[in-house]
Every structure is written in C-alpha cells, then in structure tokens.
Amino acid sequence: ETGVTQTPRHLVMGMTNKKSLKCEQHLGHNAMYWYKQSAKKPLELMFVYNFKEQTENNSVPSRFSPECPNSSHLFLHLHTLQPEDSALYLCASSQEYKKTFNRGFSGNTIYFGEGSWLTVV
Amino acid sequence: GQQLNQSPQSMFIQEGEDVSMNCTSSSIFNTWLWYKQEPGEGPVLLIALYKAGELTSNGRLTAQFGITRKDSFLNISASIPSDVGIYFCAGLSGNTPLVFGKGTRLSVIA
C-alpha cells in the first residue's frame, strides 16, 4: 500500500467540465508534487509545493489550478481542458524540497501515488 | 535543460537472464533514483543513490552511482516474470527539480 493516495483513479470529463484530482500523503512529508505522464514522453513536472507554498510552476496552462491546503493534501483543479490533456497525472511527496541540493541529501527523494487516469472527451 | 539518456529503450529477455540498463548525462548529478512502473500504476522507488561510487542492492536489484556523477546503472539478476514493467532513472542536481529518463520497457519471456 502506497503512502500517497490519489482519487479518483480514473476520470472522464468533457471539455467544458470542471473536476478536481485529490492527493493525500501519509508519510509526514512537507513537499508535494504534480507530474503529468503522457505516452512516449518523460515524466513532466507540473507543480511543486513546499510547506504549503508553491515553489515551482513549470509553465503549466492556467486550465490546471493546484491547491495545497496543508502539507498532507494536494488538489489539481481542472477546467476547460483539451483532449491533449488526457494523461496519467501523478502526485508525489518528499520530505521537503530544497533548491540547492547537497550531496548525500535524501530529503528530495520523491514517492509517487498510483496516479489518476484522465480522459478528456 | 538537463537530459537523461536512458538505454536501452526496451528489452525482451528470457526468464532467468540478467538485465542491465543505464542512464547517462552530460551534467553532474548529486542523486540518482531508480523507479519501476507497472501498467496502470504509479512509479515505485526501487533504489536511491546519494554518493558517487555508491553501490546499493535491493534483493535481486543492484544499482551504482557512477564515479563521474554523470551516469548510473541498474542490474537485475535472474529475472522473473514479475520484473516486467518500465524502469525509470531520475537524477537531481544543482538547482533543478528531478529529471527523468524516458524509461526502459522490460519484457520477460517465461
């Protein structure tokens, strides 16, 4: 059983719908992440939250809106998505997120949830 | 931006064979991570490496952090059918978030 749980596991939505993905981590971590995984592409970082503050936004379109109410919960609000946004959305967490990475520092090691499969029709 | 070159892209092996895959980069990394992803699931951390030259095992899996800090390899000994999946390397360096390779898809023929 993973320490990072995501709901729903599968979501089908129309382009005019508004939906949300939810992530909860039970690892006592302080950093949470959203990644997008599309076919034949490397994992793409979308957002990073460290101690509830957004520290990375990887040029993600505004139709994706993250929310981090506390260190254990992360949401991804979706609205007016496009079919090309269909993908596996992965939540992850780590002990913390440090921009200056020191050798031997393990706090940035991330642990993934099981993912939410999103299909936009 | 930084890139990781992971090879091979895919492998078909017989059960019982050993497997080797690697990741290389032109950049120096401070951390190497190896993940396995099975169909319909998120990546699961297999091995984490934090020091150059470090050699770490996890059951039949062994991974090494290259001395130059620009590469890492993962070996799987005596493969079994449940080893099937996509294996990803990931690296951390400097001021950039985790960078992922494109994955090695492993198929095991019984």
Image (tube, coloured by chain):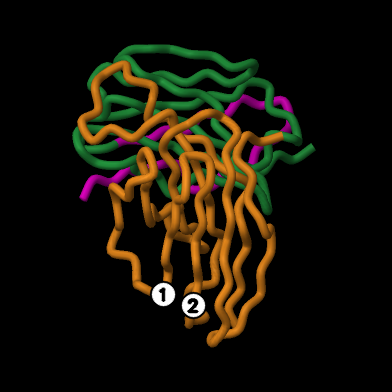
Looking at the picture, tell me which residue is in the foreground, B54 or A79.
A79
Percent of width and height locating residue A59: 28, 64
Q: In this figure, what is the number of numbered marks?
A: 2
Q: Is residue B4 above or below residue B48?
A: below
In this picture, residue B42 sits left or right of residue A71: right
How packed is label 2: few (under 14 Cα within 10 Å), some, or many (20 or more)?
A: some
Which chain contains the residue that carries disc 2?
Answer: A
Identity of the residue drawn at 63% across and 18% down: B60
- Whether residue B17 appears in magenta in the rendering, the answer is yes
Residue annotated with mark 2? A79
Label 2 residue SS: strand
Identity of the residue drawn at 28% across and 46% down: B3
Amino acid at circle 1: Arg
Q: Residue furthest bottom?
A: A16
Q: Where, quadrant-wise, is the C terminus of chain B in this rendering?
A: top right
Label 1 and label 2 in one chain? yes
Percent of width and height locating residue B46: 56, 27
How packed is label 1: few (under 14 Cα within 10 Å), some, or many (20 or more)?
A: some
Residue annotated with mark 1? A63
Percent of width and height locating residue B42: 60, 46
Which shade is chain B? green
Residue range corresponding to the magenta coloring: B1-24
Q: Is residue A57 above or below residue B51?
A: below
Amino acid at circle 2: His
Q: Residue furthest front?
A: A69
